[in-house]
Amino acid sequence: MEETMNFAIIGTGAVGGYYGGLLCRHGFEVHFLLRGDYVHVQEKGLTIDSKDGSFRLKQVNAYCRASDMPRCDVVIVALKTTANDRLAGILPHVVKPGGVVVALQNGLGVEKTIQEIVPDATVIGGLCFLCSNKIGPGHIHHLDFGSVRLGQYRADGAAAGITPELRQVADAFSAAGISVDLAEDLALARWQKLVWNMAFNGVTVVLNATTDQLMADPSALALVRGIMEEVVAGARACGHPLDENFIEIMIAATKNMVAYRPSMMLDFEAGRELEVEEIYRLPISMAAAAGVAMPRSETIALQLEFLDRRNRG
Amino acid sequence: MEETMNFAIIGTGAVGGYYGGLLCRHGFEVHFLLRGDYVHVQEKGLTIDSKDGSFRLKQVNAYCRASDMPRCDVVIVALKTTANDRLAGILPHVVKPGGVVVALQNGLGVEKTIQEIVPDATVIGGLCFLCSNKIGPGHIHHLDFGSVRLGQYRADGAAAGITPELRQVADAFSAAGISVDLAEDLALARWQKLVWNMAFNGVTVVLNATTDQLMADPSALALVRGIMEEVVAGARACGHPLDENFIEIMIAATKNMVAYRPSMMLDFEAGRELEVEEIYRLPISMAAAAGVAMPRSETIALQLEFLDRRNRG
C-alpha cells in the first residue's frame, strides 16, 4: 500500500505538526485534525522552523471534526496523553479497515487504550526523541533530534517482532526524512524510555531546572540515578529485562546533550496538564502489582500532581 | 542556683533573641553573643514585637567575641545548626564549670556535638514550637506559638528522666513566661518532632507552599503522610517507639494551624543555608544503620541540596 498510503494526524502540535509536516512535504497525502489552530491552518497552512531546514506548507488538508476526514491507512495519534479521552470519538471515523494506528505518545498504556477503541487496527507505538515546540498557530519550531523508535503492540505484552505493517510505516517515515529505528519488543522499548523520562521529566519540573543543571549537581544526579534504578527494577519485575549498564548509558548520553527542557517542563511552562498518569502513575502501578515499590518516583508523581493543580489554577 | 542564675545566648536571632529577650525582661542576667548585629544591639538594644505583648530592651549585655563573655550557669545555643562548627570556639569560653548547655536547635545530633565540646557540662535539648523571625538588626518578630519542650541528653540515647538541672532550667523559663513541657526521653522527643519537620520543612521549600496549601491538596497530603510513615518506621528501628496514632495527631494538629512557613522555608526565602544535615541526613543515616530505608525523605533531601546550592549561588 506504500505508494498510495495516506495519513491522518490526530493532534497537530509540536509532534504531529512536525512529523505530519515532513510526510506532507515528501508528497504523501496527509490529513490534519486540529482544534484551536483549525481556522489559521486552513487559511495559511503549516510553518516548520527546523534546524534541519525550515519549510512552509501553504495549503494542507485541515479538519476540525474527525467525521469530516477520509479514512486513512495510517492514523498518527500525536495528542498529549491527557487528551486521550477524545480518541474514542475520533479513531472509529478515521481508521481505514485493516489500517494502522501509530501512537507518538509518552508513557505506558496508550496502545492498549487505542486497541480497545479500534480492535481490528494494527497498533504501533512510536517513541519520539524530539525537541520541538509549537510557538504559534500552525507554527512548529523543531530544535533538535527527531528520530522515532517504532514497535508493534501486542495485547499480551510480548515482543511482536518486525512485522510487515511496522516495516511499511518505517519505510514511509524514512522516505520523508525521519530517522527511524525499529524495536522488536515495544513494551521493553517503552520501559527503556521511561528510565529517562521518569527521571528527567518530573525532576526538571519540580526543581525548575534543565537537564544540564541537574547533571551538574551531585545531589540532583543522585536523585536522577535513584529514580532510574527504580524504573529498571520495575521493568524487570514486569518481565522486561533491561541491560545492567543501561542507566550508565542514559547518564552518559544526557551528559552529552545540550541544555534540554523535557516535554513535561514545556507543558508546565505553557500551563498545560502534565502527563503524570502515563509517565508515572501507570508504571508505578504495574511495578507495584509485580511486587516492586517505586517510592522516589511516587514522591515525584505526588509533587507533580500538586504543582499541576496549582499551575492550572 | 536559680536566684542568681545567669544566661548566655549564643546566636541572637529569631530564636535566641526571642527567648533571651524574655529571660532578660524577667530580670535574669543575660549575655548575648552576636555577629552582624553586634554594633546595633550594643547601641540600641533588642526589640521584640510579639503577639503576646511587644517590648524593648534598651540596654543589653552584647558581645561579639565569646572570650569577652563571663562564664554562665546556662548557655543557650540558638544558632542555626549550619553554624555549629563555630561552637568549638565558643562554648569552652562561656560555660561555667558544672554548667548547663541548652540546645534550642532542630534535628538530631546537636546535643552530641555540644557534649563532645564541653564534656563536663549538663546538656539539655530544647524543641521550640515557635514561629518567629528576625526582621531587622536586633529586631525580632514573634508571630505565633512559643512553647519549648526540654529533655536532658544522655550519650547512650536512653531516657534521662526529669533531672534537677532540667527542672531548674524549666523553672527559669517558666518564670520568664515561656511555656515549658518536660520530656523524660529526649531522643524520643527529637524523633517525634522529626515526624513533623521531615514532612513539612522540606516539602514546603520544594513545592514553595505553606502548610495549609499542602494540607488542602490530596497529593501533597499523601506525600506528607508517606514521609511521616518513614520517620515513624525509622524511629522505631532506632529504638524509639512512637504511638500508632502519632501521625494522625500531627495531621490533625496541622489542619488546625494557620498558614505556616516552617523555619526551613524562612531560611530558603532569606537565602540562608538549609539545615538538611540535621533534619534529614542524620536521621536517614541512623535509620539506614538500623535497617530501615527512607527513600521519600531522601528524595526530599536531595532536592533540598540542589535547591540550596542554587539559592545561595
Image (cartoon, coloured by chain):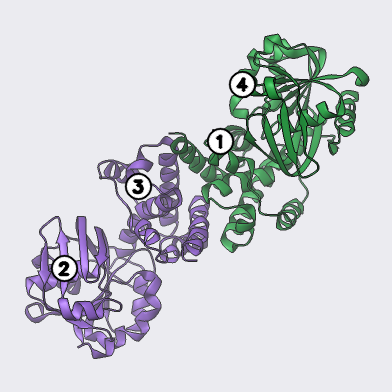
Chain colours: A purple, B green
Q: How far apart are marks 2 and 3 (CA)?
A: 27 Å
Which residue in the protein does label 2 denote? A47
Mark 2 vs 4: CB contact within 8 A: no
Do tags 4 and 1 sit on the same chain? yes
Which residue in the protein does label 1 denote? B274
Q: Is B202 displayed left or right of B251 in the figure?
A: left
In percent of width and height, residue B153 lies at: 78, 26
Q: Which of marks 4 and 1 is nearer the N terminus?
A: 4
In percent of width and height, residue A239 lies at: 40, 59
In percent of width and height, residue A243 lies at: 33, 48
Tell me the mark number nearer the camera, choosing from 2 and 4: 4
Q: Which of marks 2 and 3 is nearer the N terminus?
A: 2
Q: How far apart are marks 3 and 1 (CA)?
A: 22 Å
Please tell me how crowded label 4 is: few (under 14), some (14-19), or many (20+) other residues with Cα within 10 Å.
few
Label 1 resides on the chain identified as: B
In percent of width and height, residue B203 lies at: 57, 48
Please tell me how crowded label 1 is: few (under 14), some (14-19), or many (20+) other residues with Cα within 10 Å.
many
What is the residue that sits farthest to the bottom in this orientation?
Answer: A67
Question: Which numbered circle lies on residue B35?
Answer: 4
Mark 2 vs 1: CB contact within 8 A: no
Please tell me how crowded label 2 is: few (under 14), some (14-19), or many (20+) other residues with Cα within 10 Å.
many
Q: Which amino acid does label 1 sit on?
A: Leu
Tell me the mark number nearer the camera, choosing from 4 and 3: 4
Which residue in the protein does label 3 denote? A210
Mark 4 vs 3: CB contact within 8 A: no
Q: Is residue B310 in view?
A: yes
Q: Is residue B180 above or below residue B167?
A: below
